[in-house]
Image: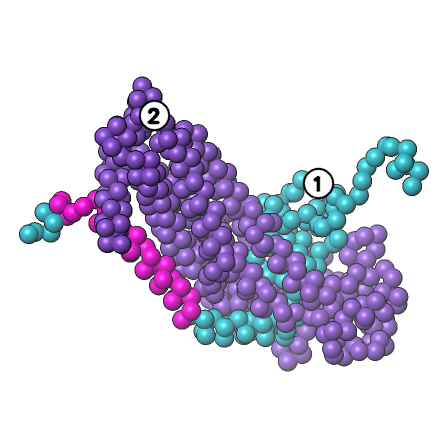
Chain colours: A purple, B cyan
Amino acid sequence: MKHWLRRQRYLADFTLAALARRRVKNTGLIVIYSIIVFVLASAMMFSAALRHEAGTVLAKSPELIVQQLVMGRHEMIPGSEIEKLAGIRGVAAVKGRLWGYFYDSVNGANYTFMVPDDDSYDLQPGEAILGEGIGKARDFTWDTAPLFVTSLAGKMVKFTVRETFADDSALLTADLVLISEADFRSFFDLPPDVYTDIGVSIRNEREIGTIVQKAQLVMPNARFVTRSDIERTYQRLFDWREGLMTALAAAGVLAFAIFAAEKASGLSAEEAREIGILKAIGWDTGDVIAMKLWEGGLISFGAFLAGTVFAYIHVFSFQAGLFEPILKGWAVIYPDFALAPYIDGLQLATLFAITVIPYTAATLVPIWRAATADPDQVMR
Amino acid sequence: MSLRSAIASARPTTPAFIAIAVFSVGLGLAGLHAKLSEPAENLRLAANADLVERIGLTDLALFTEARYTRHPSMADLHTAFQDHPASFEHFPSGIFVPPPTGLASGTLSTSIEDLSQ
């Protein structure tokens, strides 16, 4: 065993000395490789953490939301529908919800105006609770500076800011403006008995399917969004194969594929000659392959470790700052959020499998061909 | 032996193995950090879940540029392809939102069998 280990160490020494002869090329290789792993690992960790975050917090979203559809588009729903839904057995509470968007022409940002479901907020007319992004977008000089907004009717409205949501909840509340129902209706010029949609609380979560079936009979034009639909939307959005993940990692994967293909396509004449000489002085095929395994293994494992560690620091210490411009798009408000550090073992194993194994295998194939050939033929 | 001469006479694998060991410890520390910050993060997530329940939130405020990326779960049925089910997206964040499921489930055919159905 000791003899075997010593032999492997000498092989690794020889490999590294050979790599050091082409120092610039190989350093560049390791750096690029690490960057590819870094981008892939950052995207993986970021989307896994977002998925975890969305899954945990949105588990408390309304059990069922009923939207009115007119010609396939979302419309305001009349308050009279509330009674129809309340009459269905198993429904605990039904409440009209008011929320909508406001484009602020001062800074080009979109705000979400909303009346909170819970009456305990007890917002008085003229009062507002703001998300952390609004003060920043408006350059508030102090936290509770009043918010002046111009309604579509051209009326200037002043809201006194009762409080601002903490940074801890930025991912949920960055662009929120919570106001009272009276303010909401007068600001958007809404008639008294219409709502954006209706939130339904259900006593037993297992009955949601049956209740939706019954409600569909009562309201054939409505669209029903259940809590599990909401969760599914976010799981898909941050899924490995779809949406966010693909968009962020596609470039990295493509670069890596070119990289590995280039490596697999063949040996340089110099490398082939080196193998020929090694075989001529008595190395056997196994030694040559073991040496190249060390080369592929050290480069890819080193790049995997470095890329993963830096990705963790990037995502969880620097809030995935490099992704911010991509995710922000044209939005003015982007939440300043920190994600719960989270490493998914299976994901790490997948990353290992798609980066380390193909590269090591790609270096082995041409070596196998050269190492099994006659030294005289290889050197020629 | 001075440090410099020690480094100069070291075998090539020594610095490589040290670097791998350092990054392995780094990865271990990252895992430990994730584990140790779990209780505090769970409290924060529970407080946020409570906020979701009290306000009645349905979506994350991650993409605020367009209404259907701000509230993907509440958006119209064709979203994020608002104007046409297969249209190109107007907004950069639209590229992160996958097309609706079942978009390509229909068939387009001019064969006699299909047309007679």
Residue placed most toward the observer, A137 or A45: A45
Q: Residue at x 40, y 53 (%)?
A: A308
Which amino acid, by three-letter code, is at mark 2? Answer: Asp
Label 2 element class? loop
Image height of B3 relative to A53, above or below: above
Residue receiving disc 1: B87
Q: In the orientation shown, which residue stands out farthest toward the left?
A: B1
Q: Position of residue A300 (x, y in %)?
A: 38, 45
User: Hey, which quadrant is residue B52 in on the image?
Assistant: bottom right
- Residue A258 appears left or right of A77: left
Residue A27 % position (x, y): 30, 39
Q: Quadrant of the C terminus of chain B?
A: top right
Chain letter of disc 1?
Answer: B
Magenta part of the chain: B7-36
- Magenta span: chief secondary structure: helix
Q: Image quadrant of residue A287? A: top left
Amino acid at circle 1: Ser
Q: Position of residue A163 (x, y in %)?
A: 54, 72
Of all residues, the one furthest to the top in this rendering is A380
Question: Which sits in the foreground, A94 or A373?
Answer: A373
Label pair 2/1, CB-CB below 8 angstroms: no
Can residue A242 be seen here? The reply is yes
Element class at badge 1: loop
For residue A374, which numbered disc appears in the image?
2
Mark 2 vs mark 1: in front: 2
Q: In the rendered image, is residue A151 in sight?
A: no
Q: Is residue A197 above or below residue A263?
A: below
Q: Residues within 10 Å of mark 1 (few under 14, many from 20)?
A: few
> Which residue appears at 80% of the width and 78% of the height?
A90
The residue closer to the viewer here, A147 or B20, is B20
Q: Residue at x 60, y 49 (%)?
A: A242
Q: CA distance from mark 2 to mark 1?
A: 59 Å
